[in-house]
Image (cartoon, rainbow, N blue to C red):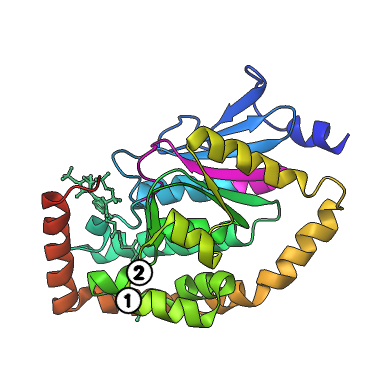
Amino acid sequence: MFLRSALSLWPLARNGTRSYSSTGVTKLVAVTVDDQTGIATVNLQRPPVNSLNLELLTELSSSLTDLEKNKSRGIILKSYSDAVFSAGIDILEMYKCEEERVTLFWSALQEVWIKLYGHFAPTVACINGHAPAGGCLLALSCEYRVMVKEKTIGLNETKLGIVAPQWFIASLVNIIGQRQSEVALTTGKMFTTEEALRIGLVDEMAENTEDAFSKSLEFFKKFKNISPFARAQTKAFIRESTIQALVKNREKDLKMFINEIRKENVQKGLGQYLESLKKRKVS
Ligand SMILES: CC/C=C\C/C=C\C/C=C\C/C=C/C(=O)SCCNC(=O)CCNC(=O)[C@H](O)C(C)(C)COP(=O)(O)OP(=O)(O)OC[C@H]1O[C@@H](n2cnc3c(N)ncnc32)[C@H](O)[C@@H]1OP(=O)(O)O
């Protein structure tokens, strides 16, 4: 009954799923909702590597708001690409950036993290490609991570000469603990899927995208006999202090970010990193 009335809020059904975009035109984020289960698949689709820019984050943020309003039964976050889940922040949002744009950009990233980390329904990251830095952050924000074998994931900010903000760090610590996080963050470690599984950074390994997606769907079955309210409230209690630490300090966090990336040595490092990316290829 609940499912029916929640789903009736969604746009027209097509082949058992409802496609949907907050702007009416699907661009960088495509949302489909399964008619039977009410589970939403949020597909990031910004070629070539789903790097996070203002436009993608703005769409993701409004999709998350709509999913919350429409009482989705769960979210699977994945990439359109089998190679890259998300390459993290689009370096061009930090390199030689305008104050107005970078303010909007960082605020949008904060907003997405707050909404995804605190989403009332179960969330799974179907990590069907590499997930460095901001890409890893999105995966860490979900409750469960299924990752395709032979990919990489991690918060590699120190390798770029930048510092992962406190909320990035907290998201990692809450999953793999302080000691493992300290080593990983200070060395900018990128874990292979196999390594990530060993330390609990991901929960399951998959053969390919299809396998990852079906394993992601399995996760929701754990809650078949659990009250959705009890589940959601428990999640909210567990995550509240981590979320509040940013919510209360958003302005300060924004100033720190802008201050940090404007430093001459940081700008120089970002420029060199961009150049090195253009020269190198990952197999
Ligand atoms: C005091 C503390 C307070 C504040 C802190 C201050 C600052 C810290 C703030 C934020 C933290 C930062 C978070 C981030 O997310 S930074 C981004 C980190 N990302 C990476 O390091 C990933 C880089 N990319 C890769 O490693 C590979 O591209 C990847 C493995 C993802 C995919 O490899 P593949 O071989 O499939 O593709 P490529 O040929 O490498 O790339 C294609 C194309 O895309 C460009 N590219 C890749 N990543 C990015 C990116 N993140 N931003 C912009 N552009 C990117 C790449 O250059 C290629 O371009 P082109 O040659 O023109 O085709």
Residue 2: in sight, yes or no?
yes
Specify the quadrant of the image occupied by residue 8: top right
Q: Residue at x 60, y 49 (%)?
A: 124
Q: Which mark is residue 221?
A: none
Secondary structure beneath disc 2?
A: loop
Specify the quadrant of the image occupied by residue 91: bottom left
Pointer 1 residue: 187
Residue 201: in sight, yes or no?
no
Q: Residue at x 48, y 61 (%)?
A: 196
Residue 227: x, y in percent? 87, 53
Q: Residue at x 67, y 30 (%)?
A: 34
- Pointer 1: residues within 10 angstroms few (<14), some, or many (20+)? some
Specify the quadrant of the image occupied by residue 90: bottom left
Examine the structure image and report whether residue 71 is included in the region drawn in magenta.
yes
Pointer 2 residue: 189
Asked whether, in this view, residue 158 is left or right of residue 5, the answer is: left
Secondary structure beneath disc 1?
A: helix
Asked whether, in this view, residue 83 is left or right of residue 137, the answer is: left
- In front of the other: 127 or 256: 127
Task: Estimate the spatial distance between the alpha carbons at disc 1 and disc 2, rounded to whole Å.
Answer: 5 Å
C-beta proximity under 8 Å, tags 1 and 2: yes
- Looking at the rendered image, the quarter that the N terminus falls into is top right
Examine the structure image and report whether residue 155 is included in the region drawn in magenta.
no
Which residues are drawn in magenta? Answer: 65-86
- In front of the other: 113 or 220: 220
- Looking at the rendered image, the quarter that the C terminus falls into is top left
Residue 93: x, y in percent? 27, 58
